[in-house]
Image (cartoon, helix red, strand yellow):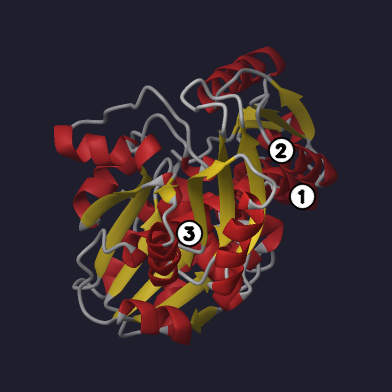
Amino acid sequence: MISFDDIKKAQETIKDYIHRTPLVYSNSISRITGLEVYIKLENLQKTGSFKIRGAANKISHLSEDERKRGVVTASAGNHAQGVALAASRLGIKATVVMPERASISKQLATKGYGAEVILYGNSFDEALEYARRIERDRNYKFIHTYDDNDLIAGQGTIGLEILEDLPDVDSVVVPIGGGSLISGISIAVKEKKRDTQIVGVEAKAAAAMYLSRQSGKNTPVTSLHTIADGIAIKRIGDITFPIIQQKVDEIVTVEEEEIAAAILLLMERKKIVVEGAGAVPLAAIMDSKTRIKGKKVALVLSGGNIDMNILDSVIEKGLVKSGRVLRIEVELADTPDAFARLTSIIAGKKANILHIVHDRLSHKLPITKTIVRLNLETKGFEHNEEIKGELINMGYNAMVI
């Protein structure tokens, strides 16, 4: 197992490759949760993710022969950028295999750091298999995405920084993908403060570690459909799995709507943009998925490389989850003044109409009726109930969608 000394050495090795990211206290999130919440801003890290830490440590340990041969890796995005940047700093040729579904922004960023990008397969696992083929065919050195001792030691430097900035931390909440991040952090933190609680968080749609802990063995998942693409891994690493089993106190999962709501909350309250994987620690404490030990909690916001093309839908999901968007369906008489009366009631309740759809063709409706579906911007759940109650009082058949 990786030792605390390995992580201390990694801290010295990578110091010129990374930013020392801030650990900041959040008044607003602390007030909402009743905890003392600190957020570790790895979304502000070089390449927009913690992955540069492990990649820099790994590549710094390559032999001269391995550097001359070049490196190859597989990644959906963040690890790709970390390897590309670290390799370019040392003048090493880097090839990165990314799934064809990888976001264009991450593809372009990886190329921008100097790597050759090859798109292959529909999943990370298919890209990984192809990267292994390139390793054999071109005699490159393979850099694993998460299951590697040097990577784990590099990621563990985040734990050292948290302890330096918040020595009396009670709980640290960390995303879990392949497991290198939480493995390194748990080794670092437990060495110095054994009673600190380590909580791992996965998207429910990609909960390989949660299932593995239940079964007692490394258990892969069969399907991955989550906005937290940075942690959408089918199988935990063979190196990371026993570390997590030994060092991590609790594993929890969060739903897609909870992740979206956490992304939105960070944007609105902290003016911070994080990707889905970076938001899962906040989602876990916002929806009381974990029994936090003590009061002082550090959330590791692992990355900020969210795909701008899905940000609109993420925000909409977050608004619905938090009660800020109300979607209702109302049956109206198909007359010129019916819609005007409906909108005047909504305006009187101080709601803003975002989107309207008329449906006159439903087979369930008589010829004299129409269905109107509205998306309303509201103040929250209490406001939603007021609007629905007013519509019912005025004789409308109103249903929340």
Q: Secondary structure at mark 2?
A: helix
| Whether residue 127 is situated above or below residue 279 in the rendered picture | above
**Nearer to us: label 1 or label 3:** 3
Vertical relation: 294 (above or below) 334? below
Tell which circle, 1 or 3, labels the residue nearer the N-terminal end. 1
Is residue 393 visible in the rendered image? The answer is: yes
- Disc 1: which residue: 90
* Gap in angstroms between the C-alphas marked 2 and 3: 43 Å
Callout 3, which amino acid? Ala
Is the C-beta separation of discs 2 and 3 under 8 Å? no
Q: Secondary structure at mark 3?
A: helix
Give the mark toward the camera: 2 or 3: 3
Residue to which mark 3 is pinned: 261
Q: Amino acid at mark 2?
A: Arg
Residue at image position (46%, 83%) is 28
Place of residue 25 in the rendered image (x, y in percent of width and height, measured from the top left): 47, 84
Q: Residue at x 19, y 73 (%)?
A: 195
Secondary structure beneath dot 1 equals: loop
Which residue is pictured at 43% across the width and 82% down the height?
Answer: 164
Q: Which mark is residue 67?
A: 2
The reply to whether discs 1 and 2 touch (Cβ–Cβ < 8 Å) is yes
Residue 54: image location, x then y, percent: 55, 52
